[in-house]
Amino acid sequence: MLTLYCKVYPMETNWASEHLQIIRTLMERSAVYRRALAPIMIFCGVVGIAGGGAGWILRVESPRAFVLFWAGAAAFAFAGSFLLVRRQALKDSEPFWSPPTRRIAQAMLPALFVGCGAGALLGLPQGSSEIPVWWLPSIWMGLYGCAIHAAGFFMPRGMKVFGWGYILLGGAIFWCFTFLREAPSMIRAHLLMGGAFGGLHLAYGIYLYFTEKRRNES
Amino acid sequence: MNPEPFLQLDRVIHEKGRLAIMSMLAASPELSFTELRDALEMTDGNLTSHMRTLQESGYVSVAKSYENNRPLTTCSLTTAGKKAFTSYINLLEQVVQQNRPK
């Protein structure tokens, strides 16, 4: 009897380790944000590209107008994203402000807050005009990348890579413009913003559209 | 080798489906019925049956409400459920520790 028990017991301990691993995986999955991201990314991409095009056509040139214009575009993109998330939650009979949604918001907030502060330096009437406005798009990109990367801890794996894309792009642009003797026209900054924020979101949204598990539509 | 921890494992939690439900709920303050069903790929009937067993044991509480005129069922672990789950994990760890080479 003892011999049989000694043979069976190691099998049970293997089973116990496997069970612990399954529990860990399930607990991690429980904390992950599960809404379909493709529609949100595509929407943000379209808003970004439309914003870049509108800024270029309308020739929004002054630093303050540039900040206010893109703050408006960002507010519109966030509002639209929230509506899309809410619609998905309603469709699935799930709470909108769920714990994973709360975690994402909390993770993104600090970097976005700093980005708002950087914009306010140039956007407010009493704001400084000494700071080269060309730095702003790269700073926004870097901070937005940090926000996305932080949120990526509670989202599917690719989101952290997407965040790194913005961090690297922002860093590269910042580095390039630091060494320029003369800043290019602000009109080009709109194209940069549209290309970076709109183009990258749209590309990632299309990628997600074809790869994301369509859980919410089943 | 001490077989005691293995024999102490809570049989209500030990079942595969119920263990999955308990694990998901342990990592989140609350989850909706549909979130649980989709994440665990269970049928409505299967999940309801397991939830009933867990409710009867006092491990899970189920709240029914309305959000935007749609019914919303949310599930969460009770204090007894959290305690039972923690004990279950501790026992599993003891089983693993006992067989670890020293």
Image (cartoon, coloured by chain):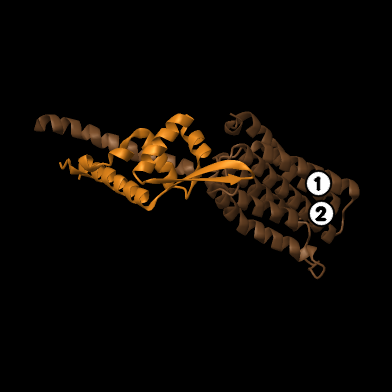
Tell me the shade of chain A: brown
Q: Position of residue A180 (x, y in %)?
A: 78, 55
The quadrant in which the N terminus of chain A is found is top left
Pointer 2 indicates a residue of which chain?
A
Alpha carbon separation for disc pair 1 and 2: 8 Å
Residue B100, can we see it?
A: no
**Amino acid on which disc 1 is placed:** Gly
Callout 1–callout 2 Cβ contact below 8 Å: yes
Precedes in sequence: disc 1 or disc 2: 1
Chain letter corresponding to the colour orange: B
**Residue at x-position 84% and y-position 58%:** A65
- The quadrant holding residue A160 is top right
Q: Which residue is mark 2?
A: A69
**Residue at x-position 26% and y-position 45%:** B91
**Residue at x-position 89% and y-position 46%:** A57
B74 shown above or below A65: above
- The quadrant holding residue B14 is top left
Considering every residue shown, the one lying at the far bottom of the view is A126
